[in-house]
Structures are given as structure tokens and as C-alpha cells.
Amino acid sequence: MSKSWRPATQLVHGGTTRSQHGETAEAIFLTQGFVYDTSAAAEARFKGETDGFIYARYASPTNDMFEKRMCLLEGAEDARATASGMAAVTAAILCQLKAGDHIVAARALFGSCRWVVETLAPKYGIECTLVDGRDLANWEKAIQKNTKLFFLESPTNPTLEVIDIAGVAKLANQIGAKVVVDNVFATPLFQKPLELGAHIVVYSATKHIDGQGRCLGGVVLSDREWIAEHLQDYFRHTGPAMSPFNAWTLLKGIETLPLRVKQQTENASRVADFLADQKQVARVIYPGRKDHPQADIIAKQMSGGSTLVCFELKGGKDAAFALQDALDVVKISNNLGDAKSLITHPATTTHKNLTDEARAELGISAGTVRFSAGIEDSEDLLEDFARALAKVGA
């Protein structure tokens, strides 16, 4: 029945397993281990001859409900919930590679994601090539005989570049490589990477899925064969497991995901249009606007805009700081996807560890600002920006 439900219904009811008490809300199973009726029953469980839980580092009932609900939303066969979004990214990459393998990754990545592929992976003998992911020719040129993995974000953090996922997947399939997509900015509501040909999708559930700034979490989704062959043992033995309490919190957050993302996207669109007309603003990048550089790809692979807006102030860092400090409704924070509107200055926060040259390549200037729309009244947000911009000056 759940497979025929529409997303909003799946996100309220999908994957729910009730205990003998018949609780309305999902139960939190705060336990490390599980007991068996007999020694033979324990042996059979460990052998995989009978279904059931063994240890909370491997799986637990609450985490299992969250994973199943995410699978329904994403259209995936299987998933593993992790302690954070970066735990999901790292697990998805490292679980399937070995020394001598090669990664091709888009250069426009969240700072920690870029560190994993550019700094961590080479420590274990895994090569990496970073490319301008907007041009498929760059992906093709970077392919080597040992290329095993393509990794990308789309839209990217923070400049909201969009990459042709289907095109990258086609190249990967030609050489037997896998495509991992970090889909956090688009959310599973606006973009379905698996339907576009990607093999693995990762999320920081900390963002829109929780949506209220309460807890950390991540998730890796793919087909059952890939999970069993590559991720399962890595996951069990390295221990990036999500806390059952966080899984329960995320289950509550995901129920309202469509409502929040709809309002956030409407607010982001209005703010983007407002900012585009302001004299202090040099440029605005928003996937919902016709002037987005990859508008044609957005039309093919995304069903909605974004809850994020990237814009550049003419006055550089001083103007960016002045704007952020003058805002009242919008709060300064490096998080995103929250019910509260947030703003950050990437050059001094999320991407501060990159060189000046690397930031310039990504289009991150001293005046670049990233806005994450919340669910407030849009008029209050527009008035807040108008007041703050007046203090920035021309």
C-alpha cells in the first residue's frame, strides 16, 4: 500500500512499525543490544538465518523506520542512517574504493566534502581529480583507466551551480563507475538523482529533513545489492550509526517536509527577486530564476527551485558583514534548511579553508552571501532585507 501513496502521505505513515502497545507516534528504542530466547536463536540471528536486530551499531527499530521512510521518498531499495551528513558522504565514498582507484569530483563542493576527496582519500592511495562540473566534457576528459567513482553536489554549496546528473551518469556507466550525488540542497522533493541515473544518493538529514535545528543525521541510499556488497560491512565495523533518538527526531521532522519546503521555496524566490533589483547587489543566483546559468538543466532535472539564495554584494566583505549584522529576522548561522531564515558568509565560514584561488574558481568572492529561507512571513523577510541593505549603502 505504501508504494502507491503520494509523498506527503509517505512522509507521515511510511515505514512505521508499532510495538505491542500500538503507539500513535513512532517509539524510540533506546537500547544498545537485544536479547534472544535461546542460544540457538542468537546463533541463527548472527548467521542471518532469521530476521531481527543484533546490536544498535548495526541497526535498531527506530533507525529502521527512518531508513524505510527515506527509501519510499527517494525511490531507493535500501538505506543506512548515519550520525551526520559528513558520515554519510565519507561512508558512501570510502566503502567502495581501495588504493589505486580514482575519483572524479566536481570542484564546487561543501568544504568538508572537498576535504574528503582532495585530502583524506589520497592518504589511502585513492587518487582524485577535481573538475568544473558544469561542462560534461570536463568529466569525460578527467576519466582514467582506474576511475571508479564520480562525486558531485547539485545544486552546489554555496553558489548553486547545477550539474547534469543524467549526463554524468551516462559517462560513468560507460566505464563501470558509480555516481554519488549529494542531494541536500535540492531535497528529495525537488530532485530524484536515482531516477536520473545516479547510483548512490547522500543527505545531511541535519538540514531540511530535520528542518528545525535540533539534531545531526545523515543517510546513504542505493539499491540492495550495492548496500550489501559495499556499505553494510563498512557501516557495521566502522560505526557511523545514527542515534535512535536522532532517528525519532528526524521522523517527526520529515512529516512536515513538504509543507516547510514549499513555504521556504516561495520565500527564497521572493527574496531572490527582491535582491536582484537592489543597487547594492552585484548578482543573484537562484535556481528558480530564468537568468540562472544552467536554467535548461534545471528544467530537465528539478521539479522546484530552491530554499537557498546566493548573492554577491558590491562592497565585498565589509558590505556582507554590515548586511548580516543589520538583519533582525534573519539570523547568522552556517546551517541551512531550518524553519528559521539563516544567512552566512562562505568565505569566512563554510569555505574558509580553501585558498583564495580555489574560492575564486568557485565564484565565491569576499562579497558572496548564502541565504537559507525559513518559513516566516515573506513580507517580514523582505522588510528585514530592505532595512539591512539601507545600512550597507550604495
Image (cartoon, helix red, strand yellow):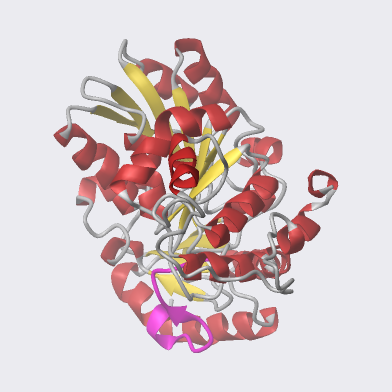
- Closer to the camera, 299 or 48? 48
Query: x and y percent of residue 13 in the render?
Result: 75, 61
Where does the C terminus fall, quadrant-wise? bottom left
Query: x and y percent of residue 149 in the render?
Result: 39, 26
Above or below, 133 against 348 in this view is above
Query: x and y percent of residue 116 in the render?
Result: 27, 43
Queried whether the magenta region covers residue 204, the answer comes back as no
Name the outermost residue toward the left.
123
- Closer to the camera, 119 or 59? 59
Residue lying at 74% horizontally and 71% vertically, measured from the top left: 22
Above or below, 145 against 192 in this view is above
120 left or right of 57 in image:
left
Residue lying at 59% horizontally and 47% vertically, measured from the top left: 292
- Closer to the camera, 253 or 162? 253
Query: x and y percent of residue 1 in the render?
Result: 84, 47
Residue lying at 37% horizontally and 73% vertically, measured from the top left: 320
118 left or right of 103 in image:
left
User: Residue 320, can we see it?
Assistant: yes
Name which quarter of the figure residue 392 lies in.
bottom left
Residue lying at 50% horizontally and 11% vertically, measured from the top left: 174
Above or below, 87 against 311 in this view is above
Name which quarter of the figure residue 221 lies in.
top right
Above or below, 101 against 222 in this view is above
* Magenta portion: prevailing SS class: loop
Region of the chain picked out in magenta, as a range: 324-337
* Tally of marks: 0
290 left or right of 202 in image:
right
User: Residue 393, can we see it?
Assistant: no
Queried whether the magenta region covers residue 333, the answer comes back as yes
